[in-house]
Amino acid sequence: MKMKIVWSFLVTAGVALVTACGGGAGGGGGIAGIGGTGVTYGPVTGFGSVIVNGVEYVTSAADFSVEGSSAGIDQNDLDVGMVVTVTHDDNDNAKSISYQDNAEGPVANLNAPGNTFDVLGVGITVDSLTVYDGLTDVNVDGAIDINDLANDDIVEISGHITAASAVLATRVEYKATCSTLGAGEEIEVKGTVSNVDTIADTFDVGSLTVNANGLMPIGLANGDYVEVKSGTCPSPNLSATSIDNETEGADLSDLDAGEDGMELKGVIANAAGSAPNCSFDIDGQAVRTTSGTDIEGNLSCATLVDGDTVKVEGQLNAGGTLVADQINREDSEADVDSEFSGLVTVVSQTSSFNGVITVNGSANIAVDIATAFHGDSQSFNLDTLAAGTLCAEVKTDATMRAISIDEEDCN
């Protein structure tokens, strides 16, 4: 298995508060604004309750939803690498946790050496921190990664939007193949609309043409963001069974602008402007800086460019733009300095997610709440590793801090 670390954005009320220093180490808790509610958006990195952006949120009273449905949904329906929205109070008690994937459909144009493929017209990029689930080691190289995918494999993608109809995947989960897609099962894609043709009753999402079948929403326009579902794989067009307007990124339906806090993680896109008034997008959320924005290292906002992974703290204004109080650069694949694989020994621990380990007699590796844990169950953490019988692949940064710990077979 492979793991994806979490990057986060934090929105606070009034005063800029840093939940984590650069390099991804966790600290502090989620911040709620004067309205008593905060929103945290980012990939899940572990479970005790649910850990997102270096904070463990208590879920005992939380409502859960997946793809807009809450019926029968609970914490067991979540997994590491899923990008979720957590609504919480200022004591890190989760009120609700919602998950929406980016796409679920067949792999096309697979380019394993280039770490890219398409899913229903959306360009997917993976890296060494992407979490994979449901796959087997097809090429028998000891790793589960893009090399174990094939065109027409149906996969579910969760990740960060890096451009229109482009996603950096934090999680890739194998579901089925086009030939085994059962009756009543659906594939789906979320993306930006282009080439709307009301006469032909078609439009495009990325490189995919959708036959609307009379379901095109009234007033659908180029640039709209939609979710399209179908019961069959495209050949070559996708035959829609439902089309709905969607909102990119975090679910902000419970957030009051100017009152509640917000926490988001992502990759910068559409960077523009000049210091101190820069702007960019994070997973479709507009962000802007001011003269009061504190950027890690006392840097100018002009140093922030497309592709940077950052953590942003601030508040939404009345227009829905996140006004940043604090911006920290966060870990990315470029920060992976070393990889260790083998039997894990827990040297010491102060909690289920903080301590020191070694792997096959390696030097000490520091583990903290920002480390992503991906195992065969949600209980995978330092407590289960303490038995000294489990093996893992551990990726570290240059300081020997664990970015990710991915359980693997001991053979």
Image: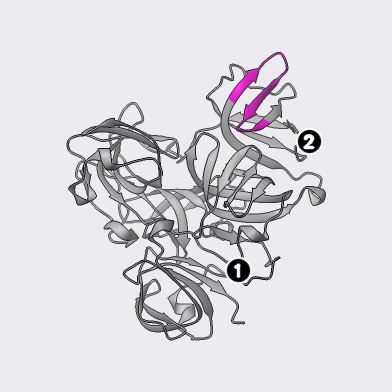
Work out whether residue 101 can be spotted.
no
Number of the label disc, if any, that sits on residue 143 = 1
In the rendered structure, which amino acid carries the disc numbered 2? Ser
Image location (x, y in percent) of residue 15: 19, 44
Tell me which segment is drawn in magenta: 194-208
Left or right: where does residue 311 sit relative to residue 226?
A: left
> Split into 4 quadrants, where in the image is the N terminus?
bottom right
Taken as a whole, is the magenta stretch helix, strand or loop? Answer: strand
Q: Is residue 325 above or below residue 134?
A: above
Image coords of residue 4 (percent x, y): 48, 59
Nearer to me, 81 or 256: 81
Q: Nearer the viewer, residue 349 or 191?
A: 191
Residue at left offset 64%, top offset 70%: 141
Residue 12 in sight in this render: yes
Q: Is residue 187 left or right of residue 297?
A: right
The residue lying at 62 percent from left, 61 percent from top is: 133
Residue 108 shown in magenta? no
| Residue occupying the point 28% across, 50% down | 328
> Which numbered marker is on residue 235?
2
As displayed, is residue 162 above or below residue 339?
A: above
